[in-house]
C-alpha cells in the first residue's frame, strides 16, 4: 500500500481538484508542468543552491540531551527554526517562485494567517523581483502587526480579506478569487499541502527536503536512517508532510501528528480537525474539515495562529483514516508549558505551533531506546507577546 | 414512459423563440421567508428561468455582492432543509424552470442522491454547482442526476479550450453557462469587443446545447449585448443589489427595465 498520491491526484479517497471552471486552466497548466519542471536538472540545481546559500540548509538534526534525559528516550530536533525567515515555510516558497518563473508568471499572490507564509512569500518575491500581493484576514492583520510590517518592508502589498470570518480561510478564498480574476500572469503560492491537486503534492515535494536530510543525518549519528517515530504539529500539514515524506511507505517508522485542541477538543474552541472534522470539500480539495451538519465551514480556534485551519491536507486525512499516523491533540495550556520547558532545558524558544508537537512527551510514553525525531518547525520570536501574556512574564 | 423521455422544463423553455432572461437570487436574503415571494414575483413579471442560490459559507466563485448576501442568508437561518421546506409547494403556483445553484459541500453533506431525489420531488429542473468538476460529475454523479430528471449545467470561460468546450457540450443536456470574462460574479463596466467576439466564437461552434451568458450582466444594455449571439442571459449580483435597496415588493420595475 502506498500512502503517497496516486495518478489522479488522490491520497486514498482524499484530494482531487474541486474547483470552479474559471480556475481550471490555471490549475491544469500547473498540473501538466509541475513534475516535468521539478525534474529539470537546471531547476534542481537552482532550487538546491538557494536552499543552501539563501535558506541555510541543511538544517541541523540536533540530539536534545537534557530533554531526552527528562523523558527517558532519545529525542532529536530537526531545526527548521534556523532557516531564513524562521520556519519551514521558506522551503516551499523558494520552490514555488522558481516554478512560477518557469511558467512565465510575473505576479505572485498568497494567503497568510499568522503571517509566516506571507513573509516567506514576500521574501522570495523580493529575491526575484516579482510583484507580490498577500491576502490576510483583517482580524489577523490587527493581531499580527509585526509580520504585516515585515511583508511591507519586503515590498509586498498586504490586502485585507473582509469576507466571511475574516481570517485564514477567508484570506485563502480571496487569493483564489484573485486568481480567477487574473488567470494569465499570476501564480498562487499556497502555503500548505492544501488546495486543489497538484498543490498538496507539489508543496509536499518541496518540503520533502526535510526528511531527505533527516535520513542521512540520522545515519551519521545513529548508524541507521530510520527513526522509530517522527513527530510534527499539523495545521494544514506542510511541516508534517516534509518530515514524513521519505518515511511514508516505511511502516517501521511510526508517524505522529499533533493537532491543536485549543481550549479542549469538546470545548467548541478547537482546531482538532481529525476528531471534529467530517469528509467534505474545502479550497478545492476533498478532505476532513470542520463544518456544520449543513455543510457550512466553521471557524477553528487555537492559541497558535498557524494551526487554526478548519481543514487538513488530503495526505493527512488519508494518514488518519488509514491509521498510518497516530493523531494526538494538545490544548493551548499544555502546548505553552511544553514550549517553556524547551526554553529552559535546551535554550531554544519554539514557535507555539512547534510547542504542540513538543507536548507529546507528556502525553505518550516512549521506550528508552526509541529514536524520536521532532520537527522543530519554527522559532518563537513571533510569539513573544502570546508567551508574555500567557505566563505573565 | 421513463424519465428520460419526459422533456425537462428547461429543455422546453430553450425551444421558445425568444431570448431568455434568467435571474439569480440567494435563498434567505434579504429575509429568511422571501424565497417563494421572490420566485412568484419574478415569474409574474416575465422572467423565463430562476436560479435559486443555496448559500455557502465560502463561495469561491462569487464577488462581494453575492458573498455578502450569502453570509446574511446564513445568519438569517437558511439551510438546505429550510430551503426544501420553503419550496415544497412551489409547483402549485410556479411553472417556469427552477434551477438550484450552490457549492458542492452542502450537497455532499445532505447526500448527493438524497439531494437529487428531493429536487425531483419538489420540481427542480436543474443544478449549477461551480465547484463540481466535469470529470467527477461524469464518473460519479451523472447517473444519479439523470435518474432524478435533473439537468446539470456546466460553465465555460474565455480560457476554456475548444477541446474542453466540446467535451462539456457532449455531456450536457440543457444549456451551457458562458462566463462572460475571467472573473468572479458581479457587475463590470459593460462588455467590449473582446466579450462580443468571444460570445460569437462560441456561437459559431454550433454546439448541441444553447448558451446562456452570465457574470457582468446588470441592465438592459448588457442583456442585449449578451444575447446578441447567445440564447439568454443570467442576472445575479445586480438583482441582489436591487433587493438590498428596494426589497421584494418592486421586483416588477427591475424586470421591466431589463426587458424594455
Image (cartoon, rainbow, N blue to C red):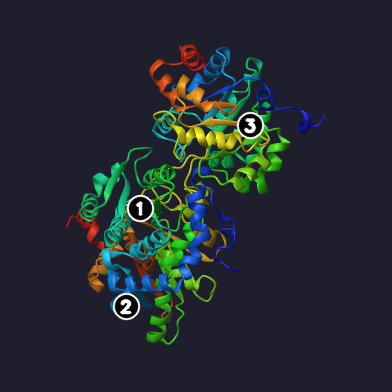
Residue A388 figure quarter = bottom left
Q: Look at mark 1 in the image and give the residue it sits on.
A: A108
Q: Are marks 2 and 1 in contact (CB under 8 Å)?
A: no
Residue located 33% across and 38% down the image: A162
Select label 2 or label 1 by which is in front.
1
Q: Position of residue A47 (x, y in %)?
A: 37, 70
Q: Residue furthest left?
A: A393
Q: Residues within 10 Å of mark 3 (few under 14, many from 20)?
A: many
Q: Is residue A116 left or right of residue B139?
A: left
Q: Look at mark 3 in the image and give the residue it sits on.
A: B210
Residue A129 figure quarter = bottom left
Q: Position of residue A266 (x, y in %)?
A: 43, 48
Spatial CA span between label 3 and label 2: 65 Å
Give the secondary structure at mark 1: strand
Q: Position of residue A118 (x, y in %)?
A: 31, 54
Parent chain of label 2: A
Against B66, residue A387 (above or below) is: below
Q: Look at mark 2 in the image and give the residue it sits on.
A: A62
Q: Are marks 3 and 2 in contact (CB under 8 Å)?
A: no
Parent chain of label 3: B
Residue located 23% across and 70% down the image: A344
Against B165, residue B219 (above or below) is: above
Amino acid at each position: 500500500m502506498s500512502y503517497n498520491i496516486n495518478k489522479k491526484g488522490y491520497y486514498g479517497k482524499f484530494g482531487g481538484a474541486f474547483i470552479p471552471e474559471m480556475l481550471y486552466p490555471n490549475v491544469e497548466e500547473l498540473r501538466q508542468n509541475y513534475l516535468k519542471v521539478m525534474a529539470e536538472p537546471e531547476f534542481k540545481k537552482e532550487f538546491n543552491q538557494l536552499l543552501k546559500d539563501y535558506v541555510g540548509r541543511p538544517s541541523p538534526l540536533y540530539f536534545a540531551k537534557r530533554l531526552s534525559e527528562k523523558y527517558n528516550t532519545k529525542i532529536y530536533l530537526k531545526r527548521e527554526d534556523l532557516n531564513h525567515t524562521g520556519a519551514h515555510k521558506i522551503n516551499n516558497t523558494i520552490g514555488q517562485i522558481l516554478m512560477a518563473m518557469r511558467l512565465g508568471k510575473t505576479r505572485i499572490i498568497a494567503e497568510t494567517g499568522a503571517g509566516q507564509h506571507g513573509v516567506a512569500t514576500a521574501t522570495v518575491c523580493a529575491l526575484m523581483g516579482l510583484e507580490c500581493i498577500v491576502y490576510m484576514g483583517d482580524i489577523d492583520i490587527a493581531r499580527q502587526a509585526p509580520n504585516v510590517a515585515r511583508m511591507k518592508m519586503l515590498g509586498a502589498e498586504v490586502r485585507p480579506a473582509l469576507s466571511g470570518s475574516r481570517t485564514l480561510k477567508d484570506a485563502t478564498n480571496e487569493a483564489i478569487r484573485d486568481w480567477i480574476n487574473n488567470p494569465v500572469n499570476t501564480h498562487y503560492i499556497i502555503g500548505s499541502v492544501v488546495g486543489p491537486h497538484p498543490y498538496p503534492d507539489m508543496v509536499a515535494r518541496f518540503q520533502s527536503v526535510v526528511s531527505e536530510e533527516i535520513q542521512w543525518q540520522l545515519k551519521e549519528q545513529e548508524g541507521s536512517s530510520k527513526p522509530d517515530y517522527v513527530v510534527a504539529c499539523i495545521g494544514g500539514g506542510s511541516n508534517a508532510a516534509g518530515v514524513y515524506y521519505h518515511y511514508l511507505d516505511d511502516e517501521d517508522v511510526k508517524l505522529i501528528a499533533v493537532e491543536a485542541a485549543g481550549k479542549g477538543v469538546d470545548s467548541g474552541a478547537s482546531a482538532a480537525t481529525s476528531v471534529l472534522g467530517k469528509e467534505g470539500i474545502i479550497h478545492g480539495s476533498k478532505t476532513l474539515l470542520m463544518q456544520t451538519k449543513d455543510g457550512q465551514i466553521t471557524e477553528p480556534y487555537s492559541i497558535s495562529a498557524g494551526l487554526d485551519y478548519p481543514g487538513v491536507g488530503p495526505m493527512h486525512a488519508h494518514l488518519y483514516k488509514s491509521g498510518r499516523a497516530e493523531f494526538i491533540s494538545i490544548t493551548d495550556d499544555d502546548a505553552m508549558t511544553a514550549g517553556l520547558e524547551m526554553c529552559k532545558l535546551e535554550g531554544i524558544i519554539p514557535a507555539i505551533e512547534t510547542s504542540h508537537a513538543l507536548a507529546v512527551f507528556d502525553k505518550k510514553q516512549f521506550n528508552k531506546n526509541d529514536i524520536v525525531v521532532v520537527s522543530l518547525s519554527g522559532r518563537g520570536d513571533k510569539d513573544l507577546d502570546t508567551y508574555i501574556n500567557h505566563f505573565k512574564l | 414512459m421513463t424519465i428520460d423521455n419526459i422533456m425537462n422544463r428547461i429543455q422546453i423553455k430553450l425551444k421558445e423563440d425568444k431570448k431568455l432572461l434568467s435571474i439569480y437570487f440567494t435563498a434567505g436574503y434579504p429575509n429568511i421567508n422571501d424565497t417563494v415571494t421572490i420566485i412568484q414575483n419574478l415569474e409574474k413579471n416575465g422572467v423565463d428561468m430562476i436560479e435559486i442560490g443555496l448559500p455557502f459559507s465560502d463561495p469561491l466563485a462569487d464577488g462581494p455582492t453575492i458573498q455578502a448576501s450569502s453570509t446574511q442568508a446564513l445568519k438569517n437561518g437558511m439551510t438546505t432543509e429550510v430551503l426544501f421546506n420553503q419550496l415544497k409547494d412551489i409547483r402549485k403556483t410556479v411553472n417556469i424552470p427552477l434551477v438550484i445553484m450552490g457549492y458542492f459541500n452542502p450537497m455532499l453533506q445532505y447526500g448527493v442522491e438524497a439531494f437529487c431525489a428531493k429536487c425531483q420531488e419538489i420540481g427542480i429542473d436543474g443544478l449549477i454547482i461551480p465547484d463540481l468538476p466535469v470529470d467527477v460529475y461524469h464518473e460519479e454523479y451523472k447517473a444519479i442526476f439523470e435518474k432524478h430528471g435533473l439537468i446539470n449545467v456546466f460553465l465555460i470561460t474565455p480560457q476554456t479550450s475548444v477541446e474542453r468546450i466540446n467535451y462539456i457540450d457532449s455531456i450536457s443536456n440543457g444549456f451551457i453557462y458562458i462566463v462572460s470574462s475571467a472573473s468572479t460574479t458581479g457587475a463590470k463596466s459593460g462588455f467590449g469587443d473582446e466579450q462580443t467576439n468571444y460570445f460569437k466564437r462560441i456561437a459559431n461552434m454550433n454546439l448541441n446545447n444553447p448558451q446562456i451568458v452570465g457574470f457582468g450582466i446588470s441592465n438592459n444594455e448588457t442583456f442585449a449585448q449578451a444575447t446578441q449571439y447567445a440564447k439568454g442571459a443570467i442576472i445575479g449580483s445586480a438583482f441582489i443589489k436591487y433587493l438590498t435597496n428596494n426589497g421584494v415588493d418592486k421586483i416588477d420595475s427591475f424586470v421591466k427595465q431589463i426587458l424594455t
